[in-house]
Image (spheres, rainbow, N blue to C red):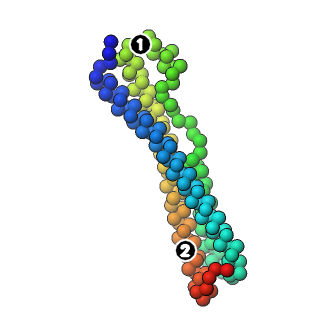
Amino acid sequence: MSVPETLRIIHEGVKERYFFEVERIKRLDDKASYIMGIASILAALTSGLASLSIKISFGGVNIFLFGTSLILLFAALYFSLRAYQFRTFNIIPDSPTLLGKCEKMSPEQVTEVLIYNYTLATEENSKENEKKIWNIKVATNLIFLSLVFFGMFAIITIATNGGGTFG
């Protein structure tokens, strides 16, 4: 008894899509960890610059721009951590269940069960990956906004100190 060609093709296609989502988890986790690193480094540099800039008289606008920049970096760190957090992903096949459920089935029926399980797992993993993507996009946008606010802070600080240096 062999599996009909159509079922074999469907099974292979669904299985490939499933493994794509599983690999996508790793790539998204890598991106989230890079964003965490960038946000952390920028927050440290921004904080360090503040300690050097203590001699500069901070006006209301400068405090607002600097504080907003730092808050946005911490928010980016938060969203990148949310993207990176551990979640439960579906792994197929679950061997004990598969053996107990399918050992007396025909090859066609086993293939159909696998197709169904791969499809369900792929949909659930894809939903989890979409959450990761949303958090990564938010974190990236927050880093960009933070850099804009920090750039305005730097320009105003330099302009109000006669073109001098920080500190």
The type of residue carrying mark 2 is: Gly
Q: Residue at x 42, y 39 (%)?
A: 20
Q: Which residue is mark 2?
A: 151
Q: Residues within 10 Å of mark 2 (few under 14, many from 20)?
A: some
Q: Residues within 10 Å of mark 1 (few under 14, many from 20)?
A: few
Q: Residue at x 32, y 24 (%)?
A: 8
Q: Residue at x 55, y 74 (%)?
A: 151
The answer to which of marks 2 and 1 sits earlier in the sequence is: 1
Residue farthest to the top, as pictured: 104
Residue 7, percent from left and from top: 32, 23
* Relative height, residue 143 to residue 110 (above, below): below
* Relative height, residue 63 to residue 98 (above, below): below
Residue 131, percent from left and from top: 51, 46
Q: Is residue 75 visible?
A: no
CB under 8 Å between discs 2 and 1: no
Write down the quadrant of residue 41 in the picture.
bottom right
Q: Which residue is mark 1?
A: 105
Secondary structure of residue under mark 2: helix
Report how far apart the C-alphas of labels 2 and 1 lie in the structure: 66 Å
The type of residue carrying mark 1 is: Met
Secondary structure of residue under mark 1: loop
